[in-house]
Image: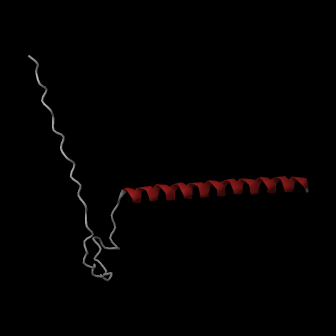
């Protein structure tokens, strides 16, 4: 006896076409001022505040270091110019 294989029916792919729908025109909205969640003059220490403080201290430190080096150079040139004359 021969066994028959069951045939598998393949589904037919349905093609769908979309038609262009006429969309309703979007109403124009004007820009409105919104209320800020926090006041502009409020103060709170955040991570960004800490970063700015560290950056400011580093910049002031470099400025003072350069000023110290310039004063040392000026004093050195004064002593060498006084010893020449």
Residue 3 position by quadrant: top left
Figure quadrant of the N terminus: top left
Please give the name of the residue rendered at 23% of the width and 55% of the height, measured from the top-left corner. Answer: 15
Residue 52 position by quadrant: bottom left
Residue placed most toward the observer, 24 or 74: 24
Residue placed most toward the observer, 42 or 26: 26
Left or right of 35 on screen, residue 83? right
Q: Position of residue 11 (x, y in %)?
A: 18, 44
Looking at the image, which residue sits at the far right? 85
Please give the name of the residue rendered at 55% of the width and 57% of the height, measured from the top-left corner. Answer: 59
Please give the name of the residue rendered at 25% of the width and 63% of the height, measured from the top-left corner. Answer: 18
Residue placed most toward the observer, 56 or 17: 17
Looking at the image, which residue sits at the far left? 1
Left or right of 18 on screen, residue 47? right
Total of numbered circles in the picture? 0
Figure quadrant of the C terminus: bottom right
Looking at the image, which residue sits at the far front? 1
Residue 67 position by quadrant: bottom right
Please give the name of the residue rendered at 23% of the width and 58% of the height, measured from the top-left corner. Answer: 16
Q: How is the image coloured?
A: secondary structure
Q: Position of residue 46 (x, y in %)?
A: 35, 59
Q: Position of residue 34 (x, y in %)?
A: 29, 77
């Amino acid at each position: 006896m021969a066994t028959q294989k069951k045939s598998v029916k393949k589904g037919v792919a349905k093609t769908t076409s979309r038609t262009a729908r006429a969309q309703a025109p979007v109403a124009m909205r004007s820009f409105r001022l919104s209320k800020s969640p926090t006041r502009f003059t409020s103060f709170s220490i955040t991570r960004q505040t800490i970063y700015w403080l560290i950056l400011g201290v580093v910049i002031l430190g470099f400025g003072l270091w350069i000023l110290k080096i310039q004063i040392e150079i000026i004093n050195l040139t004064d002593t060498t110019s006084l010893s020449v004359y």
